[in-house]
Every structure is written in structure tokens, then in C-alpha cells.
Image (cartoon, rainbow, N blue to C red):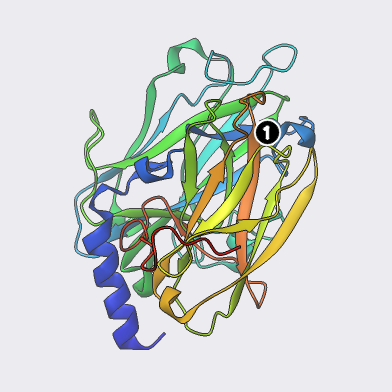
Amino acid sequence: MSKLLKLSFILLLVGTMVKAQPVPGADENIPNLITFGANAETSWGDANFCQIIFFTVPEGHNAPIYIKVFDPDCGGENDELQGEWNTQTSFSIYGGQGSCSSEDAKKLNLDGNYDEGTLLASQTFGNDSEHDMKWYTFGPINPSEGEYLPDEGGHVFKIIIEGVDGDDGNMYQLFMSAKKDSEDEVEGGYAFYYKYTVRLHDNPREISHIYPYVNDSSIVSIKQTNFDWDNDGRIIVRSVATAYKPMKISGDDEWATSMYDIKPDEYNTSLDIQMHKNRTGDYRNNNVVIYFENQYGELLKSYSVPIGGVPKYKGNPGAEEL
């Protein structure tokens, strides 16, 4: 992007991301993130037992920040039991040079130096009742300890969540806060990711969303990939230029991919990837992995709050694109 486009992008981020620190975000309508222990079966919905989330603190914010995890332990009603509780999950925060700009941190597999950077804090949780359904707080953290990335408009922190042992599913949420004892957003801060491993709603009337951002006019198409969808409903694309476009879904312990052609009106906008469950509501506890790539095979960023707001289709409201 040119310097002018980068500046416009940063201003759009700051204007949009005032309420962008919860992960999953409210507009995503996803109950929880989930990470299984390293000995789990992939058929339970986690492809590599690791998740990476990035938080950006805007330039000019000098006060300490706090990274919070809700329900970090693995051993309560919010988690997925496999036999007996035996899972250990580590939550690690990285900053410093290369922590977030490293290409290895953006890859799907745990190859290379995905944990590059300076380790600022780390904690491993097992079946710890004192942390069940409660917030655990890392910090205070000096914003300058994050990697300074001008294209992101500030300092960026990397959070690696990894199932280091066991086979249960740990469900949790993240939050970047300006306060230690409450969940107060850092004004202008935001969260993004390249791959999501999530638990879907059991209620078939609930629709979950992911918002990849099309930030480059050279992008002509994206490839959507999902894992272990269990044929549970459908995935559709909705945007400013598309009312309805279905994408392929995967079966049990399988991958599925499909292509979507980007339209000129979709440049510098978010796409609304909607995840609809089967209306029968027969399938419960469905965990899935999903990510997006451009035509060059580069992963697209998705944001916990859609940049520019939830995209609204500009055409005939009743139109469908099949």
C-alpha cells in the first residue's frame, strides 16, 4: 500500500476499533475459542492444538495495558472433557523485534520460529478450580514492549495459546484492557488473527461471523479453508457487493476449500463470512478451524471487529447470488 493508503487504513482502524478488544468480538457471535491438548484426536476439531492472536496498542497510548484470559483452566463445565481432565494449556505473550512481523508467526503449522520475539509473560493452566470461569490477568505491560509496526499503527503483541499435554478441549476468551480489575477497552486498540479455532453455538438460530479484510486492490480472489465442519450447516459470504454466496464445508476430520472472486466494490472493506448451523439442531459441541488466503497463498487478516463496520449489501435486498 502507498503511504496515503496506509494512513487512511490506520485512521479507519482507530475510528472503528474502540470496542475491539474482546476475542471473540461481539459482532462475531462466537461463544469461545478452543484449544485441545497435544494428545487429542484431530477429529475433535483442532488441527494443530495451537492458536495465535495479535493485539495492537495504538501509537500514542503510553499507559500500561493488561492481557486477560477468561476461564484459562481446563476442567469445568465450559470445557470439553475426554475421559478425565488431564490437559495443560499454556498462554504466552510475546513482544519485541520479529514477534509479530515474522512470517513463521503467520503460518498455519508450527514450523520455524513461530514463537520468535521476547517472551514477556507465560502461564500454564491445568484443572485449576481457582481459575474456572474467572479472569486471569497478565500485566501491567508497557505498550512499548510490543513490536512497533507502523503499518498497524502502533505496538503489537502476540499471544500463543498451546495445548502442551492431555487431550481435553480448553474453551476461553481473551481481552486487552486498560484496567487491571475491570474489562475496559484500550481506545483505538484492536485484535486480529490469521487462523481461528472456535466452538460454534449449539442453538441453530445463532449465526457466527468472521470478518477478513480485503486491504489490497491486487487481490482478485480468496480461498476459504475449513476443517472438521462435520457437514453442520453452511458457510456463506456476504459483502457490500454480494448478497449470498455459499462456500464448501468439510466433513468429520476433513479439510474443505472453495474460491471466492473479489469484486471492485469489496476493496478496502470487510467480508462477512457467516457460519449457519443445520436447522435441525442435531449437532452439538462443534469445533472448527477456518482461515483465508489470497491468490498468492498469503493468509488474510481477520479482525475481531469488522473494519468499517459489518458490511451491508448495497444491491437489491432480496437478491441472491448463487
Front-lying residue, 172 or 306: 306
Q: How many marks?
A: 1
**Quarter of the image holding residue 310?**
bottom left
Q: Residues within 10 Å of mark 1 (few under 14, many from 20)?
A: some
Dot 1 amino acid type: Val
Front-lying residue, 121 or 24: 24
Residue 93 in sight from this viewpoint: no
| Residue at 49%, 61% in the rendered image | 212
| Residue at 45%, 66% in the rendered image | 213
Q: Is residue 166 above or below residue 103?
A: above
x and y percent of residue 238 in the render? 48, 59
**Quarter of the image holding residue 252?**
top right
Q: Which residue is mark 1?
A: 164
x and y percent of residue 106 in the render? 59, 62
Circle 1 sits in a helix, a strand or a loop, which is it?
A: strand
Is 17 on the left-hand or right-hand side of 107? left
Is 145 on the left-hand or right-hand side of 116? left
> Dividing the image into 4 quarters, which one contains the C terminus?
bottom right
| Residue at 63%, 63% in the rendered image | 104
x and y percent of residue 142 in the render? 29, 51
Q: Is residue 292 above or below residue 173?
A: below
